[in-house]
Image (cartoon, coloured by chain):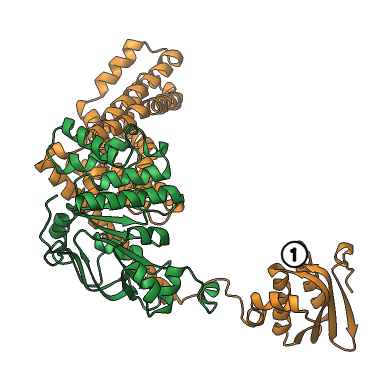
Amino acid sequence: MINKPAEEKRVAINVIDMVAGYGEDVILNHINFKVYEGEIFVILGGSGCGKSTLLKHLIGLNHPISGNIVINGIDITSNRESNLQQVLRECGILFQSGALFSSMTVAENVALPMQEHTDLPASSIDNIVRMKLAQVSLTGYEDHLPSEISGGMKKRAGLARAMALNPKVLFFDEPSAGLDPITSAELDQLIIRLNGSYNTTMVIVTHELPSIFSVAHRVIMLDKRVKKIIAEGQPQYLRDNSQNPFVRQFFNREIESDNDLLID
Amino acid sequence: MTVLSKNLTRFYSFSQEGAGKLTIHFQDRLDVSNTAPLTKEFNVLLRTHKPDNLVIDLEKLNDLDDYGVSVLVELKRAMGNRRGNFSLTNISEKVNEILSMHRFDVLGRQPISTHKTSSSLFANLGDSVFNIGSEIRFMLTFLGDTCFSFLMFLRRPGGLRFNDMIEKMKHVGLDALPIVGLISFLLGLIMAFMSSVQLQQFGANIYVASLVGISMTRELGPIMTAIIVAGRSGSSFAAEIGTMKISEEVDALYTMNINPNFFLVLPRMFAAFLVMPVLVLFSDLFAIAGGLLVGVTMLDLTVSGYINQTINTLTLFDVFWGVFKSGIFAILISWTGCLRGFQVKGGAAGVGQATTSAVVTSIFLIVLTDSLLVVILRYWNG
């Protein structure tokens, strides 16, 4: 990786005044934030606050009601199709369930993006697939079907597929959901390692506190009551110094003072 | 006066004081184990005594849970409905805690909303028009996508996943051959048998061969094959794609910048289009064999006589017409199957619905198209 001079950080993702929702239900109201290149950026919040909705908008699966999303200098909300395609070529997404194609082996899954988007001969694709699988410690599982490997392995295979084309930006939808603490910590280490060695920008949606504290450079926190970002910054700092009691409660794993949670 | 069930008297007793005042004394426990019989019991009790003032004495109650609270709520609501008074007495601290935890005071007051407020006729009408509208829009978009994918294929045929296509061809064609063969054979046999009863009376046995040959090649062969393929493959396309949709695999395709339509729909449509005509030819052959069996064993025809008669009556056009139709049916079936798969929302129930609807829509379209083709052919030939 070429080390860039320590000039100001370049913006990888810029979300400008975006309103998102389904039909008439607004879920996120006029939100703004930036993700810088090479950063591990975590989107967090309680259940139903619109984390996954935000992610779906960032990767172009849903269209915002208004506002713009600019990724690597290209606005994916205007003149959608061609811009989106151009941006997606430089993005990788790890879905919550891994979303591996169940009819293909692990190796075929990882090879698919290369077969579709590059003109590499089959033998080099095969080599790269092996290297990618080695990076996520899945050597030896090339010919297994997704149904034959464990949940953590599926996530790692999904990650290998997401990284297949060496994307500049990687998105993760709840990477540690449904994993045991050790596997989850391993995945965190993997994320940190990949970020370190490739300077990949990472956007992670999660609400697993240990994972947030170990990987995140910066977080934003969404809240479903105000439908906005209620906090932005380093997780350790927010935990100790946030002005917003809800944010402190979230990071310290405390129950809200009134019984709202029980009644909802 | 109701007779109290013996095993329930352990849990409550009641006393009547003056006109219209009824007191129920609870004992021991009021929880999940005795709620159901007690609720029924109290319904009867209230109906027979018609109290204006119901007092619940909780002094001897030791155990209460949310099921038990629901009994009290029911009583309170029943008294509210007959505009009577309802009160609790001797509430211990423990009982009070459980009552307030389950918000007893609020629960009794509100009527239960068992279902959504019934909306007006016009709102329902509007809703369904809107739904039909969005379904039609989805269908047209999907049709457009399919055409676009086809153009993509024409521009770059190498992009198609031929391995997938061959696998689907095996599934749609080869795997269906035994059942198509068997059904066609039996169909030919039945037709020959039924018609022979009539034709024998005129000594026209030999025309059984013509009847079976023409009706199978032109109509029944393609239709039966299409119905079998719709049931086997149309449904499987819908279920397969629907499952991919709910497990985010289709989303993954989008984000990998792979056109899901090109990736999933085209190989299936091509596979169906290529193998259905072959299946129909086999179906024709098996049906004629079925007719032959009846002709030879029951109608004193010779094998060569039967085959000669079949060849003499059948024109090449009859066979081609059937094959041509089967190509159209193949496109309809595979496209509908994929469409229904892409329409899946929600979970397993959505996949089930899509599968059903794929088969029903396909069969409807097959029959509709066939009728249209018959009419068109009739006028085209003059």
Q: Identify the residue at horizontal 26%, vertical 19% (top origin).
A: B311
Q: Which chain is green?
A: A
Horizontally, is B31 left or right of B137 in the view?
Answer: right
Q: Identify the residue at horizontal 34%, vertical 34% (top origin).
A: A141
Q: Quadrant of residue A136?
A: top left
Q: Position of residue A76 (x, y in %)?
A: 17, 63
Q: Nearer the viewer, residue A71 or B352?
A: A71
Q: Quadrant of residue B279?
A: top left
Q: Which residue is mark 1?
A: B36
Q: Position of residue A249 (x, y in %)?
A: 45, 73
Dividing the image into 4 quarters, which one contains the N terminus of chain B?
A: bottom right
Horizontally, is B372 left or right of A11 in the view?
Answer: right
Q: Which chain is orange?
A: B
Horizontally, is B102 left or right of A239 in the view?
Answer: right
Q: Nearer the viewer, residue A178 or A37?
A: A37
Q: Is residue B307 above or below residue B109?
A: above
Dividing the image into 4 quarters, which one contains the C terminus of chain B?
A: top left
Q: Is residue A242 above or below residue B372?
A: below
Whether residue A72 appears in this view of the structure is yes
Whether residue B366 appears in this view of the structure is no
Q: Identify the residue at horizontal 64%, vertical 83% (top origin).
A: B109
Tell me which chain the residue with mark 1 is part of. Answer: B
Q: Position of residue B36 (x, y in %)?
A: 74, 64
Q: Identify the residue at horizontal 26%, vertical 31% (top origin).
A: B166
Number of numbered discs visible in the structure rendering? 1
Tell me the SS state at disc 1: helix
Q: Nearer the viewer, residue A132 or B132?
A: A132
Q: Position of residue B201 (x, y in %)?
A: 44, 23
For the residue marked with disc 1, what is the amino acid?
Answer: Ala
Q: Is residue A186 above or below residue A141?
A: below
